Amino acid sequence: MNTKILVTYATMSGSTVGVARAVADKLGQGGATVDLQPIAQVTDISSYDAAVLGAPMILRWHRDMVTFIVKNQEALKELPVACFTTQLHLTKLPETEVSGVPIFLDPQLAKPPASPDKMNISEKLGTPANCVGSTLEKAPLVRPVNIGFFGGVLDYGKLRLLPKLFVKLIIRGAEGDFRNWDAIHDWVAVIRPQLKKA
């Protein structure tokens, strides 16, 4: 029997949609039936065998995704779930897990801190634990099989004022498309067997 997988996403300026689509396409090539939907359109997850949840990170993980996970944690705890973020900055630390959940870091995105003993504010905000740890705490019933961290797209013209100021002043991000499709495909290969219906 085919595994039916929901791939759903929240987005700020559209770049996460492309990553979600790439994940859905790759999972579909592996034989799964995949339903790609924006998170605002997902009303029932009971018909799915697995779920992949993706959203961007600027100040924190996208509020709509956090709300969705918390609200649906009773249903999500019954499914294998994988999560991913898109962002511009990620601090690479020795840890390979966040709250016991394995993580996958895009090697082009993750950079070690200049001084591990004295990280600056940008480096502290960009750790994997800071990015998704609070969501895992708010939804303790949901234990993802893996969380992938990937580069996104920065277009200052598409950002609201507060995120724009944060990215300019704290992250100091340069505009461009930083999505690493090879890393995204590698992550799908990691999660695919973990999402298959038993």
Image: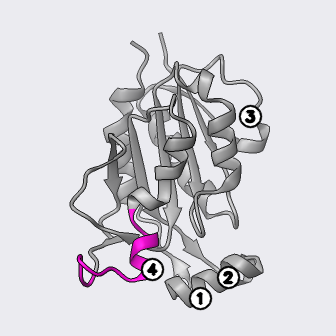
User: Dot 2 lies on which element?
Assistant: helix
Mark 1 neighbour class, 10 Å CA radius: few under 14, some 14 to 19, many 20 or more: few
Give the residue type that dot 1 points to: Lys
* Position of residue 173 in the picture relative to residue 144 (left or right): right
* Magenta-highlighted residues: 114-127
As measured in the structure, the alpha-carbon distance from the residue carrying label 4 to the one carrying label 1 is: 11 Å
In the image as oriented, which residue stretches furthest toward the top?
1
Label 3, on which residue? 42
Residue 104 in the image, given as x and y percentages of width and height = 33, 52
Q: Nearer the viewer, mark 2 or mark 3?
A: 2
Give the residue type that dot 2 points to: Lys
Mark 3 neighbour class, 10 Å CA radius: few under 14, some 14 to 19, many 20 or more: few
User: Dot 3 lies on which element?
Assistant: loop
As measured in the structure, the alpha-carbon distance from the residue carrying label 3 to the one carrying label 1 is: 33 Å
The numbered dot on residue 164 is: 2
Q: Nearer the viewer, mark 4 or mark 1?
A: 4
Counting residues from the N terminus, which is met first, the one under dot 3 or under dot 1? 3
